[in-house]
Image (cartoon, grey):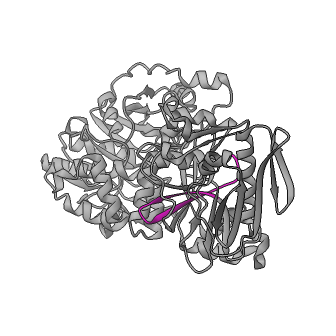
Amino acid sequence: MKSRYLGFADRRLVLHYPAALTAMVQFLFAHVPAGQDREPDHVFLLKRHGGEWCLSKDNRKIGREKDENNMANLLMGEVIYAMIDGVHSGLTLHAAAVAWKDKGIWLPGTSGAGKTSLSAWLCTRGFSYLTDELVHCPFDGRRFEAFTRPFNFKKHGLSVLSALLPETNNIQDSDMLTGETVTMIQPGAFGPCQPTAVPELSLLLFPRFEQEAALELEPMSPAQAGLQLMGCHVNARNLPGHGFTDVVKLCRQVPACRLTYGSFQQLENSLDAFCELALDSSLTPQQFNRLATMVSAPRQPPASSRADRERKQKILPATPRLAKKKLTIGMAVYDDYDGVYFSVQAIGLYHPEVRDDIEILVIDNHPEGKDAPYLKKLECLGNYRYVPFREKTGTAVRDRIFAEATGDFVLCMDCHVLIVPGALARLLTYFDTHPLCNDLLQGPLLNDDLRTMNTHFADSWRGGMYGVWACDNRADDKDGEPFDIPMQGLGLFACRKKAWPGFNPDFRGFGGEEGYIHEKFRQAGGRTLCLPFLRWLHRFERPGGVPYTIDWQDRIWNYMIGFQELGLDTGQIIDHFNEHLGEGVTTEILRRLGLDQQEE
């Protein structure tokens, strides 16, 4: 008989087995420390008897299998249980773990959460494998041990192998052990294995795989992470208070996220980059949360039936062009029928005197979405035109409003804006007296109290945005003279159609337009004015969530592209986002966008 000693946390075991099983034992426990510093807590015996392999622990028979591979699965399970039983030196948790340099990531979760497949995917991206089953963290720090066994893919999870390893058939037989319920694969098939390292826990990532789920990375509070981690705490019964105090203490020191995903394709160049940045950068909690928002996909409401899915793919036709009007009021919309409805009806209710002089133009930027049929039905209003547009999404869709407008003048507004009574009539009068106006015209934004307001953006950076709300007292008198402003939010603005300079065609997604378009008007010889009478109210709150993607990459891209176009200093962009997101995050975003070389 041969012997193999095993050590993990404060537990010690010894396995006695016949020489014929040397390869199997080596396959299972090649990366588990020997643990011969003291007498073993348990003694396992594996032997052949009556045509079966029999397993006993401390002279008690605990199982038998005819197939050697099935016995390997039984043995692994019993060894893990014995390693957990009686541990008092720290927190022992059911979790996968990988490492990046000397920093560790735990992937805690119950069976079926996707720990094994996600840790294997991370290994294919250069992370070092530690375990897919068990970690132990002593009470006095965040350095932890991992029980490094082969990857254990349950039968129902084998389908992921083709996605993880396109050349699955090329795995050496010596790297794979297949039983009735579990297939074990050596870590080296997916990437590096670093079992001897003692990394520091630096990120908690709670995975949840759901077929067809949208990608979502949601930052968790220490309380949320602590409660979920308790559900994975396998030695809780051995500790005072079930170790709850120590779990909470750990979660207060380590940032945590909840990850939901539906395929590995969703994770490409996003989750791996997030993990690297989160581990390599000294991020504040606010910066960590902002970084996580870069990964999540937009929330899309699920189709409730096959008929719904089919209807989503049908693009409704545009309304034929209307008779030419003096003013086109245009709005771009992405799944916001409620916003369009109330904005349009408010124009009809509170501005009836301008009805014969305006057309209302709606550019539907998600014409296959659930709101499209209802937006189309508003054609019944008579002076309303619906136009589907799916070629691009984001800020620059406003250019389409000017391309489709029949009016000589255009008022562009968000689809959830209300305009004070009389303001549209006064705007038409303004255009009558300034028929060749080349200026960008805006007005004061009313706050929700309908008393205070913001007349412009001050030339300053805050919170990842260029421009800070400010108020000029010259707007207190709604009959006051127009005055120059540096910039203003683009929830509502107007200009002569032929004076519109357009957004940079390389803009993508949302953000970066304020300040840019104002400077573009000025460089073309126009002014950027506040008309005190043109007051408007904007719905900012979105309890149901924003249905489209807003991420830092698009915003930084637009700022960089726009500033370069206008000859402005891009250094201020980088300086601000270094402070806002962290220098490592900003550098990585610029590298991904191919903008890092331009700044060297």
Left or right, 481 with reference to 269: left
Q: Is residue 292 above or below residue 184?
A: below
How far across and down, in percent of the image, does residue 125 sit?
43, 47
Q: Is residue 229 above or below residue 28?
A: below
Residue 460 visible, this angle: no
Q: In which image quadrant can residue 396 be found?
A: top left
Left or right, 379 with reference to 572: right
Q: Is residue 239 above or below residue 396?
A: below
Residue 105 forms part of the magenta stretch? yes
Query: Residues in magenta?
Result: 95-112
How far across and down, in percent of the image, does residue 422 sit?
42, 49
Residue 103 visible, this angle: yes
What residue is rendered at 48% in x and 46% in y? 188
What residue is rendered at 38% in x and 46% in y? 510
Q: Is residue 289 above or below residue 210?
A: below
Position of the N terminus, as image quadrant, is bottom right
Most common secondary structure along the magenta stretch: strand
Residue 482 forms part of the magenta stretch? no
How far across and down, in percent of the image, does residue 115 sit?
61, 50
Q: In which image quadrant can residue 221 be found?
A: bottom right
What residue is rendered at 72% in x and 70% in y? 40
